[in-house]
Amino acid sequence: LEICDALGETDEGPRDAIRAIRKRLTSSAGKDHISIWYTLILIEACLKNCGRRFQAQVANRDFLHDLIKVLLPKHNPPIQLQTKILYMIKVRFPIFF
């Protein structure tokens, strides 16, 4: 929850956090599945605790596309990771479907 406090300190906090999270997702895809797993846990915690400004940053197509890229066969994600990402997409991004 300290992360949520830090994100709320500045107007750019949520935007900067999403930029860093997207970078982690794209750079770790196919290489470090554990890092992606923990990044997904961080996203969920922030969605629940960091407020509307963070949620608004997550609810955009570019972020959704980065999540979907992790699922590409060339990255060979484990089933648990695939399931978690698909669940997040279904629950957090129903507006796109």
Image (cartoon, helix red, strand yellow):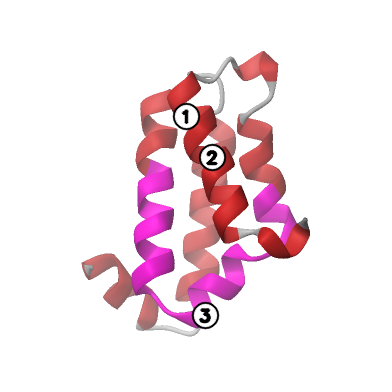
Q: Residues within 10 Å of mark 1 (few under 14, many from 20)?
A: some
Mark 2 vs 3, N-terminal side: 3
In screen coordinates, is 60 left or right of 76? right
Mark 2, residue position: 85
Mark 3, residue position: 53
Distance of label 1 from label 2 (alpha carbons): 6 Å
The answer to whether residue 80 is above or below residue 64 is above
Q: Amino acid at mark 2?
A: Ile
The magenta region covers 39-64
In screen coordinates, is 71 left or right of 18? right
Q: Residue at x 64, y 66 (%)?
A: 59
Instruction: Report x, y in % for residue 19.
Output: 56, 57
Instruction: Report x, y in % for residue 37.
Output: 39, 35
Instruction: Report x, y in % for residue 87.
Output: 53, 44
Q: Residue at x 37, y 81 (%)?
A: 8
In screen coordinates, is 22 left or right of 48? right
Residue 33 occupies which quadrant of the picture? top left
Q: Amino acid at mark 1?
A: Leu
Nearer the camera: disc 2 or disc 3: 2
